[in-house]
Structures are given as structure tokens and as C-alpha cells.
Amino acid sequence: MKSSFYHLQINIDFKNVSFYKNLMTALGWTGIFEDKDVVGFTSGSSGDIWFLEGDTQETADYDARGVNHVAIRVEELKDVDEVATFLKDQDISLLFDTPKHRAEFASSEDQTYYQIMFESPDKVLFEIVYVGEKK
């Protein structure tokens, strides 16, 4: 059997949809569908992310069992910093003392794992990460 990642659905309060649309556009994803209570994006290579109107006001606790966060990998180290600036302009705080290099996640000494972490307006935890050559 062969399989691959297909899509992720994130339930949100749709009053926040413009944040997600702007974030995904800034990350280079392409909108593939939009309706009154659903919007979908594709990276073109690694599956889709769909944002749908949630039925309840309850939010997930990323320290509980289950999905912890959504990680999106970027191609260049500077892309992480660009997203950090975008988030600052949106009044979104970075978490866990990021941005920072995480040597413990790098595959070798000449590689780096450079990340930011943040919560979306709906308390979804996101990571934007560059994994690659130290520059």
C-alpha cells in the first residue's frame, strides 16, 4: 500500500477567516475553494488545509492528548522571520521564546531547525519552520 497526506480540517470562528486567508497567502498557498463557511488552500505539493465554521465555541487544549500543532515548513530561513513580522503586524504574539534555532531537532551539526510558534485567533497552535543548511 502507498499513501500520502491529503488534507487537514481546522474548525474556526468564521469571523477570523481573513486572518487565515492572509496567513496562507503569505505562506504561498493557493486558495482552491471558498464559500460562506468554508475556505480551502493547497500548497501544491503536500496536501490541503481547510478552514470551516465550527459548531461550538469550545477550543482545543494543545497540551491535552490529540493533535498538538500544525507545522508548516518554509524553504528559506528568512521566510520564518517574514512570517514573524506578518504576525506582529496582526497583533499575534509569538510563543515559547521563538523565533529560535532548535539544535536538538537538527539532523546534523551543519543543519538548523529554526522556528516560530503562535496561536491563531481561534487558539490553534501553529509552527512555521525552516529545516536545512545553517546560513
Image: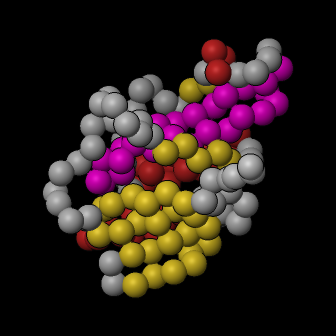
Image location (x, y in percent) of residue 96: 41, 26
Magenta-highlighted residues: 110-135
| Front position in the image: 6 or 2 | 2
Q: Is residue 129 magenta?
A: yes
Q: Is residue 90 left or right of residue 78?
A: left
Q: Residue furthest bottom?
A: 35
Whether residue 127 is situated above or below residue 30 in the rendered picture: above
The structure residue drawn at horizontal position 51% and vertical position 49%, both measured from the top left corner, is: 85
The structure residue drawn at horizontal position 41% and vertical position 39%, both measured from the top left corner, is: 67
- Picture quarter containing residue 47? bottom right
Quarter of the picture holding the C terminus: top right
The structure residue drawn at horizontal position 58% and vertical position 63%, both measured from the top left corner, is: 48
| Front position in the image: 35 or 129 | 35
Residue 59 visible to an observer of this rendering: yes
Most frequent secondary structure within the magenta stretch: strand
- Picture quarter containing residue 14? bottom left
| Front position in the image: 79 or 107 | 107
| Front position in the image: 87 or 62 | 62
Q: Is residue 111 left or right of residue 63?
A: right
Q: Residue furthest front?
A: 1
Whether residue 14 is situated above or below residue 73 in the rendered picture: below
